[in-house]
Image (tube, helix red, strand yellow):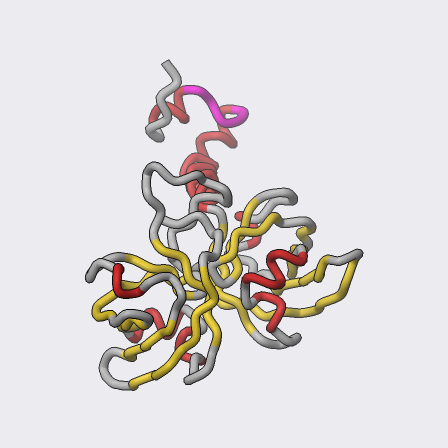
Amino acid sequence: MFTGLVQDVGTVERVLPGPMTTLWIRTALGAGEFALGESIAVSGACLTVVERTADQFRVDAAPETLRRTTLGELRSGSRVNLERALRLSDRLGGHLVLGHVDGVLPLLARGHEGGSVVLEVGLIPELAPLFIEKGSVTLDGVSLTVNTVSEDRFGVQLIPETQARTTLADRAVGERYNVEADVIGKYVARLHAAHAPRAATSGGLTVDMLRAAGFGLD
């Protein structure tokens, strides 16, 4: 579990192809203190630390990971957003992020408003029900607020701090982001889909339906 607050922008040192693609990443987070087997978010994808030195760590990306993320596009010198897993005692400054990428979506347009960079990112029909204005989204591991939503796109703004401390502003129009929708929205959408036929015949979502779905209301 993560928060979407990037702790460091690391640099890919080596990419070694094979049955599992190996990435060596340099970081200022003190890689020598990483526990082998711990989770780390690399541009929004949850991976496992399998080896480390004083300032680098190694992760392996399975073929499924490469199919569903932009990690297969990384090369030596690529910059990546890094976040170590959340401790239960940490502040939740962003939102709950699983590190499970829902889609790889293109940057459609970028502009400026005040000191912010405004991004418009493509939205596919499967994910559209999970987006609401002022809801949360994760782009390349960064927790952001959704400012606008339309049929085929959503908009976010990058304040100067986000521009300086993440890779999000590096993207050109046409390049792609790893996108994770808000996990709460996923559960609500699933609940709605599961009970839509009953709701249609009974006049709406009821307390009994919520209880049956596991929501404790007593």
The range drawn in magenta is 203-207
Q: Is residue 53 above or below residue 131?
A: below
The quarter in which the C terminus is drawn is top left
- Taking depth in this image into account, of 65 and 127 the one nearest to the observer is 65
Q: In the displayed image of the protein, which residue is found farthest to the right?
A: 114
Q: Is residue 155 visible?
A: no
**Residue 203 locus on image (x, y percent):** 54, 24
Question: What's the residue at 33%, 43% (across, down)?
Answer: 87
- Taking depth in this image into account, of 7 and 200 the one nearest to the observer is 7
Q: Quadrant of residue 44?
A: bottom left
Q: Is residue 75 above or below residue 203?
A: below
Q: Quadrant of residue 58?
A: bottom left
- Taking depth in this image into account, of 211 and 18 the one nearest to the observer is 18
Q: Is residue 60 visible?
A: yes
Q: Main secondary structure of the magenta part?
A: loop
Question: What's the residue at 23%, 82% (across, down)?
Answer: 19
Question: What's the residue at 52%, 51% (across, down)?
Answer: 143
Q: Is residue 77 left or right of residue 161?
A: left
